[in-house]
Image: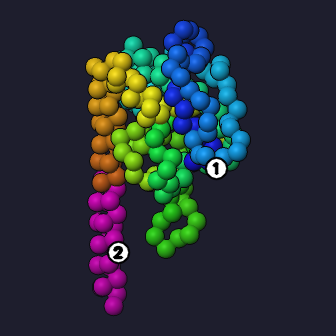
Amino acid sequence: MASSRQDTLGMGKGSDDELAHHEHGRDDTPFAATDPLPLPRQPQLSSRDRAAQLLIAPSALMTLSLIEAKIVVSYMHPETVPAGETFITEGDAVNTGFMVLLLDGEVLVENITVSRTKPVTVTVLGPGSLIGEMGLLDTGPRSASCTASTDIQCAVLTRDALESLIEEQPAMGAKFLLAVSARIAERYRETQKKLVLFARLAATMQQELDRQT
């Protein structure tokens, strides 16, 4: 991802009003080593409370409590992405170790489908959406591209920061992983339902064609 970051994250343990840097170390290098310019940082990107509330929204990890969400948020850091920037690229197998919580703005999720060379918009995500959470659990290539359709503000959790959470607060780390896994499972169940619907539609269309021939 040309405009992401892969540093250890911190999202203000010291204040509930502003996002500040966490006490863990960070090196300010961009996620993609080929990106010559880092993203502008916004230390006051959003309140810690708001980020935590969005993290437990129905579109994110609603199985966490608000207190637990605040703990997770304390291991994240704020990031700003300008409109038009693709921060996750389909097929990228290098920049996979991070998850994004969208705080403000909209993101286009796109896929390159069979027989097409240009991506097709799959969905549009708004505040409270989790993006790229699969990257925390495996090192496989990204399954879709994500582009900021407006200037966006987000909170980012890297795999390194997650490992710090698990090491320092094992119970909380385990519950967070379970919440992420449940979210991924839910998403795949929804995809499976769509596939079944498409298969039925294709079968119906084929039957209609057979009757006409």
* Total marks placed: 2
Find disc 2 in the rendering and name its residue: 205
Scheme by which the image is coloured: rainbow
Q: Amino acid at mark 2?
A: Met
Mark 2–mark 1 distance (CA, rounded to whole Å): 47 Å
**Measuring 32% from the left and 78% from the top, which residue is drawn there?**
206
Instruction: Residue 210: give x, y in percent of width and height.
Output: 30, 85
Find disc 1 in the rendering and name its residue: 34
Magenta stretch: residue 159 in it?
Answer: no
Q: Amino acid at mark 1?
A: Thr
**Residue 51: numbered disc:** none
Instruction: Residue 189: give x, y in percent of width and height.
Output: 29, 48
**In the displayed structure, would residue 122 be above or below residue 186?**
below
**In the displayed structure, would residue 131 be above or below residue 89?**
above
How many C-alpha atoms fall within 10 Å of the one at disc 1: few (<14), some, or many (≥20)?
Answer: few
Callout 2 secondary element: helix
Looking at the image, do the residues carrying marks 2 and 1 touch, with CB atoms under 8 Å apart? Answer: no
Residue 149 in which image quadrant: top right
Question: Main SS of the magenta segment?
Answer: helix
Instruction: Residue 112: give x, y in percent of width and height.
Output: 51, 63
| Residue extent of the magenta highlight | 193-213
Can I make out residue 212 in this image? yes
Q: In this orientation, which residue lies closer to the viewer: 84 or 71?
A: 71
Instruction: Residue 81: give x, y in percent of width and height.
Output: 65, 38
